[in-house]
């Protein structure tokens, strides 16, 4: 019988709670510090441009992208995309997020090993996150342990992606804070609020990793790899 409502779902509850806490913290931090303008009045786009120049990176474009908190660095096209509020914003939250994305560009430029590894497994992780459950359930329907095993195997790439993402994100935030301080783009008093914004954002990646790991454990239990359940 296919366990659509399986008691192993309880394994996900702590991760779900952590995800809710993380989302609440990042929203609260962003909302609070988006109301605090930086003393020097520089925008997120201007800051990103100056930081890239400071790091002698001249082949990364800066673009504005639609949406809220959709900021990211695209290593394939070497484009740093900032949402409107970050692109035009002069708040401490805007500067922290813009600097964080520049941190990813610096990682890419330097060949940071963990970022390279994450980019390498991304296609497999994307496939794994979408195909794992269908393969697992199809294997259970057909009574094929091999098919279920394939589903779990491909999901491991999604888990690995989340695990690797943690040091990548924390390293980008560390680089961001260092660049802001080294370039004197913010005051000493402004560094602490920016760090709070970045730490709150990092917690969302911790939650995502916890969710992926617990989901893997759940799939292993469902498939029988960690002991079969009585139907």
Image (spheres, helix red, strand yellow):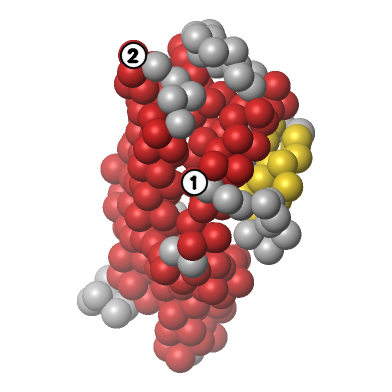
Q: Nearer the viewer, residue 82 or 210?
A: 82
Q: Which residue is mark 1?
A: 103
Residue 31 in view: no
Could you tell whether 124 is left or right of 163 in the image?
right
Q: In which quadrant of the rendered view does residue 49 lie?
A: top right
Q: Residue at x 46, y 31 (%)?
A: 183
Q: Residue at x 75, y 40 (%)?
A: 63
User: Which disc, if any, is residue 189?
Assistant: 2
Q: Tell me whether circle 1 and circle 2 mark residues in contact (CB < 8 Å).
A: no
**Percent position of residue 187, x then y:** 39, 16
Q: Residue at x 55, y 67 (%)?
A: 119
**Percent position of residue 112, x then y:** 44, 64
Q: Is residue 144 above or below residue 159?
A: below
Q: Residue at x 39, y 30 (%)?
A: 181
Q: Nearer the viewer, residue 197 or 96?
A: 96
Label 1 sits on a secondary structure element that is helix
Could you tell whether 82 is left or right of 213 in the image?
right
Q: In which quadrant of the rendered view does residue 188 lie?
A: top left
**Percent position of residue 100, x then y:** 49, 39
Which badge, 1 or 2, is on the more N-terminal residue?
A: 1
Q: In which quadrant of the rendered view does residue 40 lie?
A: top right
Badge 1 crowding class, 10 Å Cα cut-off, few under 14, some 14 to 19, many 20 or more, is many
């Amino acid at each position: 019988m296919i366990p659509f409502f399986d008691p192993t779902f309880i394994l996900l509850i702590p991760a779900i709670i952590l995800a809710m806490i993380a989302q609440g913290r990042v929203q609260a931090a962003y909302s609070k510090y988006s109301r605090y303008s930086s003393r020097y009045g520089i925008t997120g786009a201007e800051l990103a441009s100056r930081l890239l120049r400071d790091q002698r990176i001249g082949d990364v474009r800066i673009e504005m992208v639609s949406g809220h908190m959709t900021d990211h660095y695209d290593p394939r096209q070497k484009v740093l995309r900032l949402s409107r509020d970050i692109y035009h914003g002069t708040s401490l939250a805007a500067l922290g997020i813009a600097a964080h994305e520049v941190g990813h560009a610096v990682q890419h430029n330097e060949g940071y090993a963990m970022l390279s590894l994450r980019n390498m497994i991304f296609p497999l992780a994307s496939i794994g996150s979408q195909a794992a459950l269908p393969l697992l359930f199809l294997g259970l329907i057909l009574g094929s342990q091999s098919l279920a095993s394939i589903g779990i195997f491909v999901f491991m790439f999604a888990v690995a992606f989340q695990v690797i993402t943690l040091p990548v994100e924390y390293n980008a935030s560390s680089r961001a804070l260092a660049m802001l301080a080294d370039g004197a783009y913010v005051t000493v008093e402004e560094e602490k609020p920016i760090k709070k914004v970045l730490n709150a954002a990092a917690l969302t990646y911790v939650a995502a990793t916890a969710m992926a790991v617990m989901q893997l454990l759940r799939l292993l239990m469902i498939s029988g790899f960690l002991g079969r359940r009585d139907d």
